[in-house]
Each structure stands twice: as C-alpha cells, then as structure tokens.
Amino acid sequence: MSYIGAKELKASDIRRFDVTGSTSATHTLTWSAPTEQSLIVTINGVKQHEDAYSVSGTTLTLTSALVSTDKLEVIGINDIGTTITPAEGSVTNDHISTSAAIATSKISGLATSATTDTTNASNISSGTLPVDRVPYVRGKNLIINGAMQVAQRNSTQTGITGAAQFVIDRMRTSFTLGTGAYTLNHSTDAPEGFANSYHIDVTTAMTLGGANDGCGMLQQFEGQNLQHLKKGTSNAEDLTLSFWIKSTKTGTYIVELYDNDNTRQIAKSYTVNSSDTWEKKELTFPGDTTGSLDNDNQSSLWVNFFFAAGTTYTSGTLNTSWASHVNANRAVGQVNALDSTSNNIYVTGIQLEVGDVATPFEHETYGETLAKCQRYYQSFGGGSTYDNYAGRSYGTGSAFWSVPLSVPLRTSPTLTFSGTLRLFGSSGFSDSTSLSVYGYDSGRGLITINSTAFSGLTDNRSYNASYIGGTAAVMKLDAEL
Amino acid sequence: MEHMNIESAKYGLDMDGNPNTITAVIEGVIMSVPLNPANRHYVEIMKQVEAGELTIAEADE
C-alpha cells in the first residue's frame, strides 16, 4: 500500500465475510485467499488459531462444523495486484537470462521465417533491417581481388588482342579480338570506397569481323573451394553477383557463369545506362540442381564478363537458366563496347556470394588479397635486393636450388625467366639463362628449380644462386587456372 | 573459347634423363612448362598436339 512519501507498488483491499445459522464446516469466501495466515477467523468473537481451519482458494474449511447459534466472521487481505511496466529503455542485458529464448517474431527486422533460415538474407531484406546493416561476414566473396588491389605482373600491358592475359591478378582476358586491340591498365579510376579498377582502353577499334571474335574478362574458381554451393543437388545455392562498371558504350551487357566440369552455362544481361559513369549492378543466378563440381584444385566454375561478342556467341537466344553449354546462347544482345578508340571500360568491386541478395562488398586488407593471389602467381627478383638461394651442382653444367614460396602454389607452375642467373661457388661463378621447375608438390612452401647451361662447375658442391640484371632479372611462377 | 599462340615446344629432361618439362614459346615468351595436367599451359599444349597443330620436339641429349 502507498503512504505519504512512498510510491504505491501494488493495490490491495480488506475483505470481510460472515455467517450465521450455519451448521457446516465448509464455507465459500468472496475472495481467493492465498494462505491461512492471510485470514483472521473468529467464531462468536473468539479468534481461531490457524490450525483450526484451512483455506484453498475461496474455500474455507473448519476442523469442526458450526452449530446453528455460532457466528463466524472472516477478515482477510485481498491482493488485487497491478501490472508494472518498466520504463522504456530501462531493461538492460543484465536483466535478461542467458538462456532466454526470444521469439524471432519479437525481433524487429527479422521475418518470421528466419526461425528456420536465419542466414537467408532475403528474410532480413523483407523485414525492416536494411541490407547494409547485415552483420559483416568474412569470406563471403568467392571472387579473389574483386577490388582490383593486386597487380603483381605489371600495371599496364599494351597491344592485347587475345585471351589468357593478366595484368590485375586473377582477372584474365577471354576471347580473341580479331580486328581490335586494347591496353589493359591497373587503374586508379574507381567509385567511392574503392581505389582501383580493371581498365580496358581501346587502341584499335573492334569490328567483330569474325564470328568467333569477342572480348571479355573472367575469373576461374577451383572446385574444392565451391563445394558449399551444393551444385548438382536439390539444395543448390543461388549466387548473387554485384559489381561496379563504367563504360563509354551504353546498352546491354552480358555476364555468364560457366560450369567447366559439366559444360553447363547460364547468362544474365544488364544495362549500362549512362556513358562513362560508374554504375553498380546486381544479378542473381539460381542454383543449378544438375552437375556437381569436382572437389579438386582445377577449374570448375567461371564468371565471364562479356564486353563484345561475335555471332558465334550471339546468334541464338540468351540462356537465362542453367543448361548445357551452347555457344550461340551465351552472349545474345551484347553490345560491342570496343567499337571505337574513344571507348573505355572500367570494372571493380566484384563480389560473388551465396544467396539472392547483394550484400555490401567485403573489403580486405592488401595483404589478405595478395596472399590469396599468390596461390596462383608469384615473382622473384626484379629489384636490387640481390636474393640468394642455396643450391648444389650435378655434373659440371647443372644445379638445383630451392626458393621459399610466399604461400604454397596451386599446382606445379609454369616458369618464365628473364635476365641471368649467376651461380657463385668457391672457385668462382658461372651464368645461365636456362631455368625450369624440377619438381613441386602442391601445398609445399618450397620449390626446387633446375638450371642448366653452366660451365666449369664441380659435381655435387654447394653453390649460391643469385639473379643478375637488376630489375630485368625476374623469375615468374604461374599456377593460374 | 581461347587459343594460345604456341610457336614451338621441346621436352626437357630431369637428372635421370627422363622428360619432366616442356620449353615452349607461348604468346612470344619462353616458358618452362611442367608435365602436369593441372597446369593450364600444359593442358593447352597437349590440346594443340592432339589437334595436330603442334609437335613437341625431343629433348637434347
């Protein structure tokens, strides 16, 4: 009860009940009494000990029945109770049990179906939680170097007319241009939040004279990194591709996913609306219930961006559902974005993720992305560091020497060498330009190089191998897909 | 989809005299390619060999 200076915590009142002329031991109160102690029971004015009666709810039972002349009087306190609503914002984490199971329907922003599919971003999107507030998920982006940060080979390459060229790591040119040519740049032109982009600067206009002519950019994925896509099962995951593009040529462009293990393909179109303006695009590809991906280190899936395509790739109907590969259905509607030397194409911020919603781009540190790229390409030398590696001779003209790798390579790499390798020993030195990979097991952090065409070596002796030629002396190890 | 320009190819030998590499000129660059089916250059060389477009020369003894 309240009193002056005290806040009322709950309401109550005093009840009275009396009986005369009864010969019964059982009586029904007009309120529900919680305990015997909450009652004062008198018979003919004499207070009864609590042992003389019991109460259950509204039923009062005396140990002995009344006689007709008895006067029974019962006084009790009846708690009415009231609802106390905590002030808004006053309930803190400390007041919530760690084992509390809060219904998803009570969490603003989650759709009710989130109970069974809490990772489905569409549930969140359909609620009130904006997609850009989705918790940051590491490793969601299947694309390596999607922000175009890393370009180990060089920053520009001129005169590109064909396929399988790399400037920016993991981003490979696809198709043969025929009549056209372009310079590929590691550009600093990028939308807000990015520092680099993949840049095609057309230097010879492409006329699409041959049916097989085309131009594109692709990234390939190892099958062992894609098993969570559950491709080829009834639970195959949708994939959503998002990216930024800035192109001089407006109109329809095509992106395809290509299943290299099962020669299956699906394509989606998008529109470049404004010339030379950064635009973000989002495309969702349904999961493919046919054709599982090999669980190995070889090429299983491609993302292929078309920028131009000849009739070999455009004469059919665009294949917007997963189906067996038919060239004519791959790039129907694609504009020729290389039809003028005034044209430029920039791409960056590429993200391919599981689900049907494009979430914010997963930014990585340069070091994280570099390490991922070095699984596919590493270079050594090319500076003034005078790297030295331990080796040994065999015969008088050959030697092995070992190079520690930054990260293990995907597979035994192709070796390209420019400059001179000098072998230093106790009796002097000898030079060679003939290098090859002697052997490499995937997963090792060391690779053994074989070099020949030396002269005057002593068999089975220790030598130091060093690159000679400054920036021109570079050994490149290519394990790209 | 693509066709690497491979001008020449020649086997290289390991220290026991067995072929273990192919030295090839690919897109105008001399490359040492391991005999590994997971290597993209080796795959392309063998594709062109099977198509009769390329012959791999024997190694120098």
Image: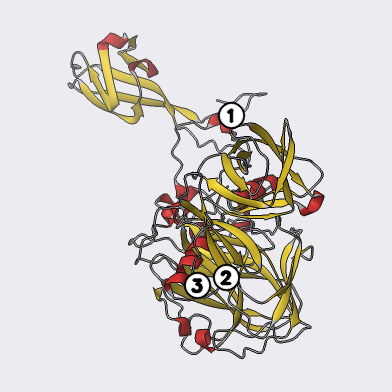
- Residue name at image x 61 percent, y 39 percent: A402
Q: Are marks 3 and 2 in contact (CB under 8 Å)?
A: yes
Please tell me in which quadrant of the rendered image residue A155 appears: bottom right
Horizontal side of A480 relative to A74 (left or right) equals right
In-front residue for pair A422/A54: A422
The amino acid on which the numbered mark 2 sits, given as a three-letter code, is Ile
The amino acid on which the numbered mark 3 sits, given as a three-letter code, is Leu
In-front residue for pair A105/A318: A318
Q: Chain of mark 2?
A: B
Disc 1 from disc 3: Cα separation: 98 Å
Categorize mark 1 by other alpha carbons within 10 Å: few (<14), some (14-19), many (20+): few
Horizontal side of B11 relative to A51 (left or right) equals right
Categorize mark 2 by other alpha carbons within 10 Å: few (<14), some (14-19), many (20+): some
How many labels, in total?
3
Horizontal side of A149 relative to A358 (left or right) equals right
The image quadrant where one finds the N terminus of chain A is top right
Disc 2 from disc 1: Cα separation: 93 Å
Disc number at residue B6?
2
Horizontal side of A6 relative to A34 (left or right) equals right
Residue A454 seen in the current view: yes
The amino acid on which the numbered mark 1 sits, given as a three-letter code, is Glu
Disc 3 from disc 2: Cα separation: 8 Å
Q: Chain of mark 3?
A: B
Disc number at residue B54?
3
- Foreground mark, 1 or 3, reads 3
Query: Which residue in the protein does label 1 denote?
Result: A8
In-front residue for pair A254/A7: A254
- Residue name at image x 69 percent, y 81 percent: A273
